[in-house]
Image (cartoon, rainbow, N blue to C red):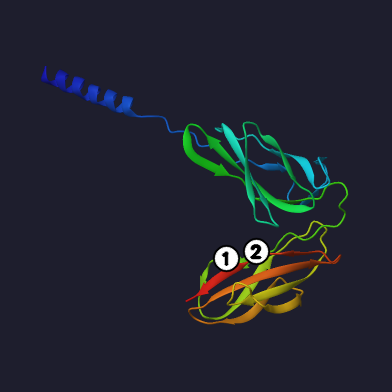
Amino acid sequence: MKGLSRICFCLSVLLLIGCGKKDPVALPERVSLMYPEQNSACITGLLISDTLSELDFIWSVSANTSEYEVHLKNLLTGATTVHASKTSNVRINLAINVPYSWYVVSKSGATSSTSKSDVWKFYNSGPTIFSHAPFPAEAVSPKNGQVVNAGNLDLSWFAEDVDKDIVAYDLYFGTTSSPPTYKTNIENSFVSNISVNPGATYYWKVITKDAKGNTSSSELLHFKVN
């Protein structure tokens, strides 16, 4: 009888443990962006006015997802808007002749976890714009807000243009939030051996220029020195 009681007790414990287990919540998967395409000049939007067009954003369907959020950033002003959708597309009104970046966040009502897609850039040129300013340059090194060691360092950046006609860069660099011109008409996307002092904060930005005279400015970047 004692042996039977022990068996019954063990079975009861196993049943309780089994009943307490829950299947793991399936996390929403990240989507693949489809349109507007990466680094493209978008001319297919429906014109609403001389300054606005209506554009369809399209991405792949992701598993375990009940809602999507499109995060759209105006690369000239830095303003970001968020647009919710239950399907894998949404139509958005946006300014013509402006570069944008966008990404999609997959969400689920079953979990607070989300998944973020890649970030793509495009130029909303509209049907009448045939020359596009470069996308604003992005910091490669140092990253914005990074802490670096005193001595000499290289500043490097990355820029693209849908017309593929970037010709030069102007670098503004200094210890004030309105940095002075450091070097103009730089052919490469870097400047080497810049001396930085310990305890200082440096600010910098890059003006990108193309063959047709169009320009764009990066955001104001900064880094600190140990």
Residue at figure coordinates x 64%, y 52% from the top left: 79
Q: Residue at x 49, y 40 (%)?
A: 113
How crowded pointer 1 is (Cα within 10 Å; few <14, some 14-19, many 20+) is rated as some
Residue visible at 73% across and 50% down in the picture: 38
How far across and down, in percent of the image, does residue 189 sit?
Answer: 71, 70
Amino acid found under the numbered disc labelled 1? Asn
Q: Which mark is residue 219?
A: 2
- Frontmost of labels 2 and 1 is 2
Residue 28 horizontal/vertical position (percent): 54, 37
Furthest residue toward top: 1
**Circle 2 sits in a helix, a strand or a loop, which is it?**
loop
Q: Nearer the viewer, residue 161 or 200?
A: 200
User: Is 213 left, or right, of 90 in this rendering?
Assistant: right
- Asked if disc 2 and disc 1 are in contact, CB closer than 8 Å, the reply is yes
Quarter of the image where one finds residue 133: bottom right
User: SS at mark 1?
Assistant: loop
Say which quadrant the N terminus sits in.
Answer: top left
Alpha-carbon distance for marks 2 and 1? 10 Å
* Of the pair 178 and 45, the residue shown nearer to us: 178
Res. 153 image quadrant: bottom right
Q: Is residue 133 left or right of residue 106?
A: right
- Identity, as a three-letter code, of the amino acid under mark 2: Glu
User: Horizontal placement of 43 versus 155: left or right?
Assistant: right
Query: Can you say whether 50 is above or below 88 in the image?
Result: below
Q: Residue 144: give its label.
A: 1
